[in-house]
């Protein structure tokens, strides 16, 4: 993990409207509360200085404007997974919780632990992620309207106006989904032209899945091996056992990208027929008595292994190809 330079550390607890700030002045701990706005950011820089190590949690959209501003001012920004800070606080047996205390814990974490430097994403990738989020919401609305229309048509008396309105809404949502997906594919093809071509060479993976996978994994540029990709997608096996105590079956973690998991699972049906390695894996697991759903999840993992090896090597899919990159520990 890349550690930041030894700059003064500032802990920032971010909420929707305010920022709780903790920093040092002449070895004394100071606290500051400012608004989560441009004026508040300027007040923060005036009090702490720009050349600091600013440590904050990822809080959805609430921390983004602050992170961008501090980065533009020359500060070093670390955006941490909230679970990491939660475990750090628990490890130190802290009691009680407040914004001021959380800011102080972020300060301590930044002083004691090596943290990774945050860098803004490319504008194109930011737009792609926004379009993907909008598309997900549109698909949910489309499913709701479709279900409502089906339920309405099953009733003994059906209002023609109600049916007409639902059909119009469904048509409009369908058109919006198509427009968003088309724009998203254009942007992804432009940004990841060679990678898209490589991924689409894998039997079972089409343009939409290839684009979603590249967006999800950031073009694979920050991944060292396929296991990281599988873990990121929440497809790593998770076992609960201790001594002679075994709690349930081994299951996947389901931490990470639900959308990419769902897309890969749909692709696994085609892959187990058209992809030689996936077909062999599926048949072998079923022959051993494993259920078909578990075998399909294994196929999803195989597709991710192939995708990682192919993008990293730059060699299109070959049925008998074996890359050392896919075997990196």
Image (cartoon, helix red, strand yellow):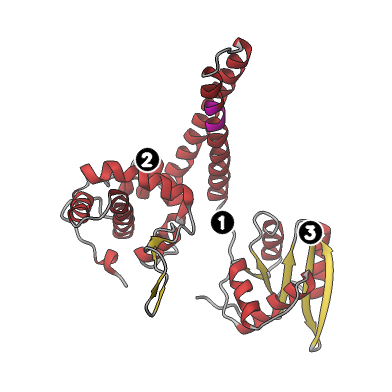
Check disc 2 and report the residue beneath it.
207
Secondary structure beneath dot 2 equals helix
Label 2 close to label 1 by CB (< 8 Å): no
Residue 40 part of the magenta segment: no
Check disc 3 and report the residue beneath it.
36
**Residue 262 at x, y percent in the picture:** 42, 46
**Residue 53 at x, y percent in the picture:** 67, 75
Between discs 2 and 3, the one toward the N terminus: 3
Secondary structure beneath dot 3 equals loop
Say if residue 35 shows up in the picture.
Answer: yes
Residue range of the region highlighted in magenta in the rendering: 143-147
Which quadrant would residue 324 be assigned to in this image? Answer: bottom left
- Residue at the image position 83 percent from the left and 76 percent from the top: 31
- Residue at the image position 55 percent from the left and 53 percent from the top: 122
Label 1 close to label 3 by CB (< 8 Å): no
| Residue 121 circle label | 1
- Residue at the image position 70 percent from the left and 56 percent from the top: 62
């Amino acid at each position: 993990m890349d550690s930041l330079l030894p700059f003064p550390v500032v802990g920032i607890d971010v909420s929707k409207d305010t920022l709780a700030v903790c920093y040092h002045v002449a070895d004394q701990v100071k606290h500051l509360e400012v608004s989560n706005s441009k004026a508040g950011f300027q007040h923060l820089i005036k009090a702490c200085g720009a050349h600091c190590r600013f440590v904050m949690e990822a809080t959805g959209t609430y921390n983004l404007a602050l992170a961008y501003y501090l980065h533009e001012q020359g500060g070093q920004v670390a955006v941490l997974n909230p679970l990491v800070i939660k475990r750090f606080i628990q490890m130190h047996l802290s009691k009680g919780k407040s914004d001021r205390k959380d800011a102080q814990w972020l300060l301590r974490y930044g002083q004691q632990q090596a943290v990774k430097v945050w860098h803004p994403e490319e504008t194109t990738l930011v737009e792609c992620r926004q379009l993907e989020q909008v598309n997900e919401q549109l698909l949910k609305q489309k499913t709701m309207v479709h279900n409502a229309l089906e339920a309405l048509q099953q009733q003994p008396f059906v209002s023609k106006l109600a049916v007409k309105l639902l059909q119009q809404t469904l048509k409009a949502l369908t058109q919006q989904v198509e427009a968003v997906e088309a724009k998203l594919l254009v942007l992804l093809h432009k940004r990841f032209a060679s990678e898209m071509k490589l991924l689409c060479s894998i039997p079972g993976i089409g343009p939409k899945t290839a684009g979603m996978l590249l967006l999800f994994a950031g073009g694979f540029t920050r991944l060292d091996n396929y296991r990281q990709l599988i873990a990121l997608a929440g497809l790593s096996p998770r076992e609960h056992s201790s001594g002679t105590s075994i709690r349930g079956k081994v299951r996947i973690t389901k931490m990470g990208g639900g959308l990419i998991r769902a897309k890969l699972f749909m692709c696994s049906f085609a892959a187990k027929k058209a992809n030689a390695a996936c077909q062999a894996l599926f048949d072998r697991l079923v022959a051993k008595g494993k259920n078909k759903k578990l075998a399909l999840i294994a196929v999803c993992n195989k597709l991710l292994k192939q995708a990682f090896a192919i993008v990293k090597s730059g060699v299109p899919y070959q049925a008998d190809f074996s890359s050392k990159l896919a075997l990196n520990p």
